[in-house]
Amino acid sequence: MPDFHYTALDASGHEITGGMDGRDKMDAAQKIRALGYYPISVNPTGNAAARTNQVNKKSNVAADTKKVNRMATLLFTRELADLIEAGLPIDRALTVLIEQTDNVPLQHLISKLQDEVRAGNPLSSALTSFPKQFPILYTNMIRAGEVAGQLPDVMTRLADFLEKEQVRKSQLVAAMTYPMVLIVVAISAVTGLLTFVIPRLQSVFKDLGSALPVPTQILLGVSGFISQYWWVIIGFIIACVVAWRLWSRTSTGQKTIDQVRLALPILGPITVKIVMARFTRTLGTLLAGGVPILDSLEISSSAVGNSLTSKAIESAKDRVRQGETLASSLRETAGFLPLIVHMTAVGEETGRLPLLLIRTANTLDLEIDTALRRLTSLVEPLVVLFMGGFVGFIVLSILLPIFQADTIVK
């Protein structure tokens, strides 16, 4: 029995399989190349395969314990694209990245990738060993670039895509940070007033000797409940959070949440545009990278982050499989914006579908930015009005008994 089983491409691009002896995977891969083949995968047989699996499991565990963050993955992609475009072989490019990076987890990850590449595996195959760092979209684009002989261009497009996604997430976080800070401060201030200030005024109200006005009674009742049963409130909040997390992980819960997100009066339209922008950018990037349209739609459906939209993309994919154009498939499937359908039709007619999809995503991004700025400008005064109204209610509840007692005395 040969030491290694391989899958390779011959000079005409046809896939072939066979066996090869060698000291290790690198030696076997070199012998396969000497035959004029391009190795896709080289796997040990028998006991050697068992040993390799054990090593791979240990490597995966080590990589998972120190997960590389998204920004590190983005920088790695951009730098690797630049090095490959400059003409460096992948092995040499990975060596340069290992020497330049100060990120120890990333350095460890690149070293594992380099070991796989030196063993004769293509870069796309090496990336599949680390699915948490490199999702299926990433590996499929790299594989398409390898097969088409356009890896530098594909790597550059992939880096651009990751940068756009990172910018979008940063913009969303930045847009929601200030309103969330205002809301937290408002809730903290209200809780402090009800817990520490109002209870100290209760004895003063009792000394007045007259029946308290309704607003004052409501205020004292709420304050007394919070002061006496604060542990019940905290426990209830924790229970609700745990129940929400468990329910949201179920298929029914996820579907319901996605429906509500898309149907909300103000946030719904923004969410729809965010999901559609992610879909068009992902699909356009995959198509530009040479990934077949059915595979691109399959990957895009899992990347949009909304189960309802994913189902709609799957329905459109089935129509495309039956021979319909992408534009007609999207038009016949509910859930896609007219802009996307129109631009898809134009792209198919002109042969520039990937470019127009990415431009559509950029247009939607601009609309999302405008909508988020308007939403932020709306939330800020609402929080201030809420705080002012509640403080006014507290002040009124405190002053009413005093005015009432003064009237009785006179």
Image (cartoon, rainbow, N blue to C red):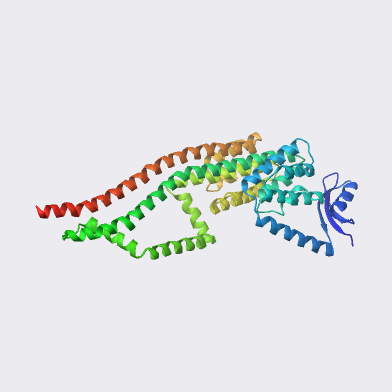
In this view, the residue in front, 219 or 10, is 219
Which of the 4 image quadrants contains residue 71? top right
Q: Is residue 323 visible?
A: no
Q: Residue lying furthest top in this view?
A: 350
Image coordinates of residue 375 in percent, x first then y, are 43, 42
Q: Residue at x 71, y 57 (%)?
A: 60
Q: Residue at x 18, y 53 (%)?
A: 402
Q: Viewed as shown, does residue 101 lie left or right of 405? A: right
Image coordinates of residue 350 in percent, x first then y, are 64, 34
In this view, the residue in front, 407 or 331, is 407
Image coordinates of residue 289 in percent, x first then y, are 69, 41
Q: Is residue 195 visible?
A: yes
Count of numbered marks? 0
Q: Residue at x 50, y 53 (%)?
A: 258
Which of the 4 image quadrants contains residue 218? bottom left
Image coordinates of residue 155 in percent, x first then y, are 70, 41
